[in-house]
Amino acid sequence: MSARIHGGAAESVMRHRQGLSSSYVTVYHSTSQQGGKPLSHVIPSGHAIRRLREAAGLTQKTVATRAGVSQALISRIEKGTVDPRLSTVRKIIDAISSSTPQVAFVSDVMHSPVISIEESRPVREAVELMRNYDFSQLPVMRNGFPVGSVQESTLLKRLTRVRDVRTFFEAPVREVMEDLFPLVPPSMTVEEAVYMLSRGTPALLVMDKSQVLGIVTKIDTILTALREEQPSRAASRSEGASN
C-alpha cells in the first residue's frame, strides 16, 4: 500500500470517512398487512451480488436473462453505480439462487481467502483494504495467526476524538485493535452462525486446527437467507394451489 494522506485534518477526516462508510447493505423497514409486524427488506451491495453470482458460476448475461433485466443493469449494480429497486434485486437473487444448492454449514457460505492485516501495519492500510474490498471489518494477524480485529465503526468513532489525523492513520493497527472474532469450525451450521451474528458478533473466523479457512460475515448469512427464500415461497404457493 503506497497511498498517502494529503491535505488538512478536516479534509483527511472527510475523505477517510467516505472510504470507511462503504454501504454494503441497505435495510428498509415497513409494516406488514398481517398483524402490523415490522419487516426488514435487505438489499445486498453490488459487491455482494457479484460474489453470489460468481459462486453460482453464472455470467452477467445469464443472470440478466433469467431476471428479465439488461446485462448493462447487472453490470452497473455490481459496480455500485446505480441504486436498484428492491423488486429488481429480488429478481436477481432469485435468478442466481435457482443455480445455487441449499447450504447448511459455514464452510458453504464463508468468504475465502481471508483478507487480513498484520498488527504492525499502519491503520491507513487497514482503511484502504476495507475500502478496496468493500468490507466493514478485518481480522488482525500476528505472524499469520489471528489475534484481534479492526472495525470501521470503531475507527469512525476514534476519528471524532483525535487531534492529529495523520498520526492516527500512521499508527500501527495494534493500537486500534479490538477483540478477536470468534473462531468456529467449518462444520458449524449456518443456523448456529446466524444466532451468533444476531447477538452482535460482526464476523466469525472459520478455522481448522491452526489454519484460517475463511470468514463469515452478516452479509454472507443474509445472502444465504435470500437464496433459500425462493424455494420457500414456491412451496407456499404450491400448497396454496392444492388447497
Image (spheres, rainbow, N blue to C red):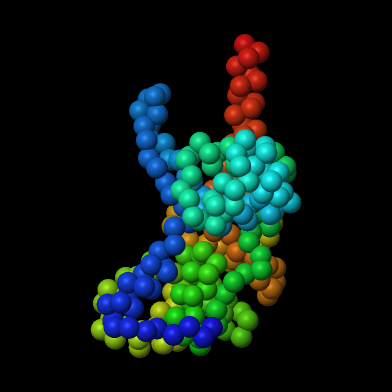
| Relative height, residue 85 to residue 19 (above, below) | above
Q: How many marks?
A: 0
Q: Residue at x 49, y 55 (%)?
A: 81
Residue 160 in the image: state x and y as whole percent. Answer: 27, 73
Residue 70 in the image: state x and y as whole percent. Answer: 61, 42
Q: Is residue 149 left or right of residue 205?
A: left
Residue furthest to the top in view is 243
Q: Residue at x 64, y 42 (%)?
A: 64
| Relative height, residue 90 to residue 196 (above, below) | above
Image quadrant containing the N terminus: bottom right
Q: Quadrant of residue 54?
A: bottom right
Question: Can residue 72 be seen at all in this image of the molecule?
Answer: yes
Residue 174 in the image: state x and y as whole percent. Answer: 46, 83
Q: Is residue 230 left or right of residue 84?
A: right
Residue 36 in the image: state x and y as whole percent. Answer: 35, 28
Which one is in front, 172 or 166?
Answer: 166
Q: Residue at x 67, y 49 (%)?
A: 60
Which one is in front, 29 or 71?
Answer: 71
Image quadrant containing the C terminus: top right
| Relative height, residue 208 to residue 29 (above, below) | below
Q: Residue at x 51, y 36 (%)?
A: 87
Q: Is residue 156 left or right of residue 54?
A: left
Question: Can residue 189 be seen at all in this image of the molecule?
Answer: no
